[in-house]
Image (cartoon, rainbow, N blue to C red):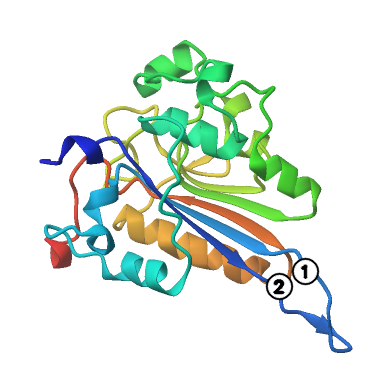
Amino acid sequence: MARSARSMWCSVLLVGLVLGCATTGGRIADDRPNIVIILIDDLGYHDLSIHGSNEVSTPNIDSIAREGVRLSHGYASAPICAPMRAGLLTGRYATRFGYGNRTGSALEQIERGRGVRTSEVFLSKHLKRLGYATGAIGKWHLGINRKYRPLNRGFDEFFGFLSGAHSFWTWSHWTNEHNPIYRDNERIFGEGYLSFAFSNEAVNFIDRHKAEPFFLYLAYNAVHSPLHAPPEYL
């Protein structure tokens, strides 16, 4: 995977705010916005054609940038993925609560109890207190042991995996049994390309909760290794 130094270990964050439009007697019944955060793993700033890349074409992401608002001077709070995620969901630098380094393998995370301290309050918990339906889909990487998992951090629903990387094709596990695909806290088995599965789950979440304010955290593991793609994109 050849990339420039400035694009390595970066991630792109897309945030969508969709205002509620239910009305009663001509007045807005609920002005709490729906919130969708799409996190793209290890995609550097210059890996997007909207930012001048000549190597990769990203027309769908480019369309979001053209039709929305581009915040061109925002930066991730850490140069590697787990601390960056912790900073995003807590609003604090991960070094302030001991999560500023590599987490290690899935087994190391389990045996050493690595995860974001439970004293840290995630954005999902704040929004849940405000009456939001909350869902996390995709890569977690904020702790594998039960107390660190999404359903204990303010999320009502979870579909994805808990460690740092996963096969895009083999759902049961990648390198060992410690990193399966979960629905909530139950291991599941399936088939198909994982990015497509995450997208379908996201659409289903929005459909199920469109009558109420919702917060969806959609964290793809693409374009993180392993380098797997469906045949039509090779």
Counting residues from the start of the chain, the first of labels 1 and 2 encountered is 2
Does 93 appear above or below 1? above
Task: Give the percent coordinates (x, y) of residue 217.
Answer: 54, 51
66 sits to left or right of 174: right
Q: Residue 180 sits in which quadrant?
A: top left
In this figure, which residue is indicated by the disc labeled 1?
31
* Residue 142 tag number: none
* Residue furthest top in the image: 112
Task: Give the percent coordinates (x, y) of residue 80.
Answer: 36, 30
168 sits to left or right of 210: left
Does 113 appear above or below 18? above
- Quarter containing the C terminus: bottom left
Helix, strand or loop under label 2: loop
In this figure, which residue is indicated by the disc labeled 2?
20
* Contact flag, marks 1 and 2 (Cβ < 8 Å): yes
Task: Give the percent coordinates (x, y) of residue 158.
Answer: 56, 47
- Quarter containing the N terminus: top left
Q: Nearer the viewer, residue 20 or 75?
A: 75
In the image, what residue occupies the spot 65% across and 36% down? 122
